[in-house]
Image: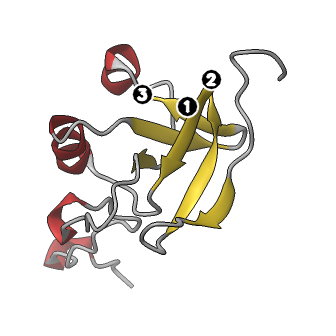
Amino acid sequence: MTGPLATTPVKPSIHARCGATVLTGHAEGLRARVDLTPLNRVGEIHALIAGLQTYTLTRGGLVHRDAGRIAGTALTGPVLAEHACHRPVPADQRATTTQPVLPAAASDKPAY
């Protein structure tokens, strides 16, 4: 896509001030620099309260998350927060990438 509202593919880069690895690109015309740690819902809320923008990473690049996109389910992909130097994401705010493993109940065992 070309023009003022262009979304570009993201590229990894090193942030000059703090040395962190970040993803950079344009999201619908806005220059975006995001951290690599995917957020869960709680993490996104904390990022928004801290005044940081959030984005969904898609094949085409970053998509800015506004109120409608946060509430909707059309976008799939990891949610990433705008980069803020020396702001680690607590473990309870990180998105999990694996399904939790639940112990099998006795009735779930196949009968042979």
The reply to whether callout 1 and callout 3 are in contact (CB within 8 Å) is: yes
Residue at which label 1 appears: 63
User: SS at mark 2?
Assistant: loop
> How far apart, in angstroms, are the residues tagged by discs 1 and 3?
6 Å
> How far apart, in angstroms, are the residues tagged by discs 2 and 3?
11 Å
Looking at the image, tell me whether mark 2 or mark 3 is earlier in sequence order: 2
Looking at the image, tell me whether mark 2 or mark 1 is earlier in sequence order: 2
Which residue is rendered at x = 54% and y = 40% of the image? Answer: 32
In the image, 102 versus 110, the foreground residue is: 102
Residue at which label 3 appears: 65
| Amino acid under disc 3 | Arg
The reply to whether callout 2 and callout 1 are in contact (CB within 8 Å) is: yes
Split into 4 quadrants, where in the image is the C terminus? bottom left
Q: Does residue 67 sit above or below 92 in this rendering? A: above
Residue 78 visible within the image: yes
Residue 77 visible within the image: no
9 displayed left or right of 33: right
Q: Does residue 112 sit above or below 37 in this rendering? A: below
70 displayed left or right of 32: left
Q: Position of residue 89 (x, y in %)?
A: 25, 64
Dot 2, how many residues are within 10 Å of its Cα: few (below 14), some (14-19), or many (20+)? Answer: some
Which residue is rendered at x = 30% and y = 39% of the image? Answer: 52
Answer with the quarter of the image where residue 111 lies.
bottom left
Split into 4 quadrants, where in the image is the N terminus? top right
16 displayed left or right of 107: right
In the image, 7 versus 85, the foreground residue is: 85
Q: Position of residue 11 (x, y in %)?
A: 70, 56
| Amino acid under disc 1 | Val
